[in-house]
Image (tube, grey):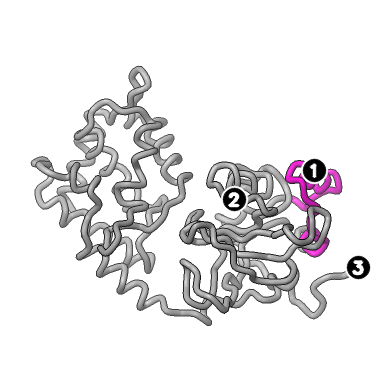
Amino acid sequence: MTYFNNFDYEDFWDDGEYAQKNYISDPPTNEMIIKIESDLGYKLPKSYIWLMEKQNGGIPKNTCFPTTTPTSWAENHIAISGIFGIGYEKNYSLGGEFGSEFWIEMWDYPDIGIAISDCPSAGHDMIFLDYRESGPNGEPCVVHVDQEDDYKITWLAKDFESFIKGLVNDDVYDNSEEEKEADLQMVKNSTFSTALLKIINNVDEIPDLELKIRNISADIVKEKGYFSLHDDEKSLLLYDLQFWLYIRHYKNITAEQYLKEYPNLIALVEREGEQIFTCGGYAPSFVNDWLVQRIEEHKIVKVKELIQFTDSAVSSLIKRMNEV
């Protein structure tokens, strides 16, 4: 049987280096499909398998899907970052490091089926194949699961093929200038988190530290169009700064302790009735990768499980911040 009739799937993908590294796998073998289905406990839709046999995962050109009800992402649509392929090798594949079981087991998403797409919120909403009505061997519908709204489930499409055909370009919902301006005002004027305020007090080594943090963040917004920390130079500078300020204040901490506290600094902060200086979400993989990178560079060292910047790394950081 042929799926996606009158649909130009050859012009569907928009894949660059990031997609090649994190999403796209070799076409799945029958053995791989059987193993994934066995491990996840659900029969994959035939239309999903058909599309993955053409290209096994990736980032589509059209990343938005219309909704009739608001979500934490927008009033009238959701957006996806990519589509998981069938395999285990790539981070964003069904059986990969950040595949379906990761979101259910580590992020407490409801066990209703298979996570097939991540979203730009870095884990705070996801797209699932929902098998609650069909059963594990039936044809699932496609739903949006909103972690920001107590895992609210919003129905999107009757099946995977309908979902793919219903994707539209983000130009349809282009309000990027308004969002950019809103984030600029946020980083310039909003209140720092309690955790961040506590550790930026009395930092004589870096005069006007709060203003410098806001200026770096404003530069990030101007470059990206929104405020989020990834693996670019300015994001890494803020990763370094948050870590140094934290260990300067609290002294003896482990990597596990810091990674647990990290969301309370800038990444994921909420306070009712106030506009807070925050990314509104984060990808733990970026923070973990930053920490591993700094350890490999010998800028962060471990002593009896405690982590610390080296003196030379601190000196370099202070110099860079005073040049901002």
> Which residue in the protein does label 1 denote?
38
Q: Secondary structure at mark 3?
A: loop
Q: Is residue 53 visible?
A: no
> Which residue in the protein does label 2 denote?
22
Q: Nearer the viewer, residue 12 or 123?
A: 123
Q: Secondary structure at mark 1?
A: helix
Q: Secondary structure at mark 2?
A: helix
Q: Position of residue 284 (x, y in %)?
A: 46, 45
For residue 1, the mark is: 3
Q: Is residue 259 visible?
A: yes
Give the mark, 3 or 1, whose residue is nearer the N terminus.
Answer: 3
Q: Amino acid at mark 1?
A: Ser
Q: Check whether the beta carbons of the residues at disc 3 and disc 1 lie within 8 A of each other.
A: no
Q: Amino acid at mark 3?
A: Met
Q: Amino acid at mark 2?
A: Asn
Left of 78 or right of it: where is 37? Answer: right
Q: Check whether the beta carbons of the residues at disc 1 and disc 2 lie within 8 A of each other.
A: no
Magenta residues, start to end: 26-50
Q: Position of residue 133 (x, y in %)?
A: 75, 61
Q: How many marks?
A: 3
Image quarter in which the C terminus is found: bottom left
Q: How many other residues sit within 10 Å of disc 2, few (<14), some (14-19) or many (≥20)?
A: many
Q: Residue at x 64, y 69 (%)?
A: 155
Looking at the image, residue 161 lies above or below residue 255:
below
Q: Check whether the beta carbons of the residues at disc 2 and disc 3 lie within 8 A of each other.
A: no
Q: Nearer the viewer, residue 301 or 281?
A: 281
